[in-house]
Amino acid sequence: MALANVSGVGSGRDEESGEDVIVVFVTRKVPRDRLRPEDVVPDELEGIPVRVLAMGEDEP
């Protein structure tokens, strides 16, 4: 996934619903209305829900 601010992608389980999800790791969460349309993480991919988690900056 080559989107601005995305540092990684993985799979996981939603803590509330228990369903399988795609997890997108970002350096920081940005409000959707402040992103370019091409940089918005979709709500789902191929029918699988997507969750975005802020992980902070990588240390050099």
Image (cartoon, grey):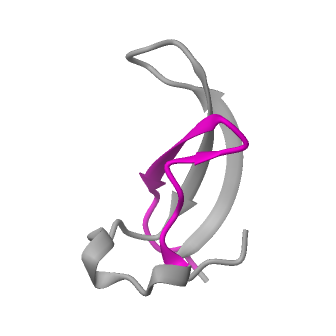
Viewed as shown, does residue 8 lie left or right of 32? right
Q: Position of residue 40 (x, y in %)?
A: 48, 71
Above/below status of 32 relative to 42: below
Q: Is residue 14 above or below residue 46?
A: above
Where is 52 relative to 46, above or below? below
Q: Is residue 5 magenta?
A: no
Which is more toward the observer, 36 or 54? 36
The stretch in magenta equals 39-59
Q: Is residue 47 left or right of residue 32?
A: right
Please state the total of marks drawn on the protein image.
Answer: 0
Residue 24 location, quadrant: bottom right
Residue 45, percent across and down? 67, 47
Would you say residue 40 sits in the magenta stretch? yes
Q: Residue furthest front?
A: 47
Residue occupying image coordinates x 52% and y 79%: 39
Check the image and report above or below for 27 versus 43: below
The image position of residue 54, as x and y in percent, is: 42, 58
Quadrant for residue 23, please give it. top right
Q: Residue at x 64, y 30 (%)?
A: 12
Q: Quadrant of residue 1?
A: bottom right
Q: Quadrant of the C terminus?
A: bottom right
What's the residue at 32%, 70% (across, down)? 32
Residue furthest top as drawn? 18
Of the pair 25 and 45, the residue shown nearer to us: 45
Residue at image point 46% right, 81% down: 37
Position of residue 38 in the picture relative to residue 29 (left or right): right
